[in-house]
Amino acid sequence: MMLMTMKRKPPPTSANAKPSSFTFKRKYTASEVASHNSTTDLWIIVDGKVYDVTEYVGEHPGGDAIAKNAGGDATEGMHGPQHPSRVFDMLVDYHIGDLQEDDDKTK
Ligand code: HEM
């Protein structure tokens, strides 16, 4: 009897998927973000959104410029002339949630 060759189902491709858009996003207070302020646990706020860039910080062409803003608002630094628009596309991958708005009053 001839064995049927089972065609293996390819694993779900992530090539075109944007995992971040399916991930549950929550809101964070500024003080919660501030507690993630080391190079092994590094969050930043950019335009009211919270990003966990821990995985990226070591690759940053701008050296420790990110680390200097660890746990804080890096909006100004991000919008500097050193960052072409593709840098903002990269940021999407690190988005974990948004800043709780009423927490922003202290600024
Ligand atoms: C406070 C936040 C940040 C500051 C102050 C900052 C600063 C800088 C500086 C000074 C450079 C220029 C390096 C050089 O040409 O010698 C640079 C380049 C770059 N940064 Fe940042 N950075 C920040 C955050 C980020 C983040 C969060 C990302 C990505 C997730 C990023 C991605 C890049 C990339 C890709 C370049 C190279 C751009 C190019 O020349 O094509 N940066 N950054």
Image (cartoon, rainbow, N blue to C red):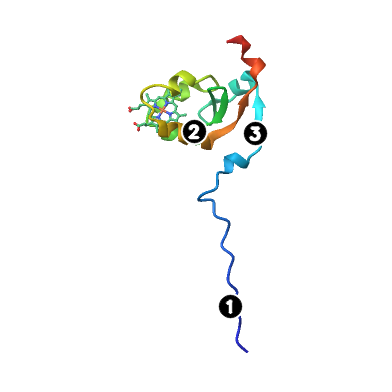
Graded by Cα atoms within 10 Å as few (under 14), some (14 to 19) or many (20 or more), the crowding at tag 2 reads some
Q: Classify 8 as above or below 99.
A: below
Label 3 residue near ligand 1, CB within 8 Å: no
Task: Identify the residue at horizontal 58%, vertical 43% (top origin).
Answer: 19
Q: Are marks 1 and 3 in contact (CB under 8 Å)?
A: no
- Mark 1 lies on a secondary structure that is loop
Q: Find ligand 1 in the image and state its quadrant.
A: top left
Task: Identify the residue at horizontal 54%, vertical 19% (top origin).
Answer: 72
Task: Identify the residue at horizontal 47%, vertical 24% (top origin).
Answer: 67
Q: Which residue is mark 1?
A: 5
Residue type, label 2: Leu
Residue type, label 1: Thr
Q: CA distance from mark 1 to mark 3?
A: 43 Å
State which tag comes first along the sequence, 2 or 1: 1
Q: Which residue is mark 3?
A: 25
Residue type, label 3: Lys
**Location of residue 89 in the rendering, given as x and y in whole percent from the top left corner:** 46, 35
**Which of the numbered marks, if any, corresponds to residue 91?**
2
**Location of residue 56 in the rendering, given as x and y in whole percent from the top left corner:** 47, 35
State which tag comes first along the sequence, 2 or 3: 3
- Mark 3 lies on a secondary structure that is loop
Q: CA distance from mark 2 to mark 1?
A: 44 Å
Q: Quadrant of residue 25?
A: top right
The residue closer to the viewer here, 49 or 34, is 49
- Mark 2 lies on a secondary structure that is helix
Q: Is residue 101 left or right of residue 79?
A: right
**Location of residue 44 in the rendering, given as x and y in whole percent from the top left corner:** 53, 25
State which tag comes first along the sequence, 1 or 3: 1
Label 2 residue near ligand 1, CB within 8 Å: yes
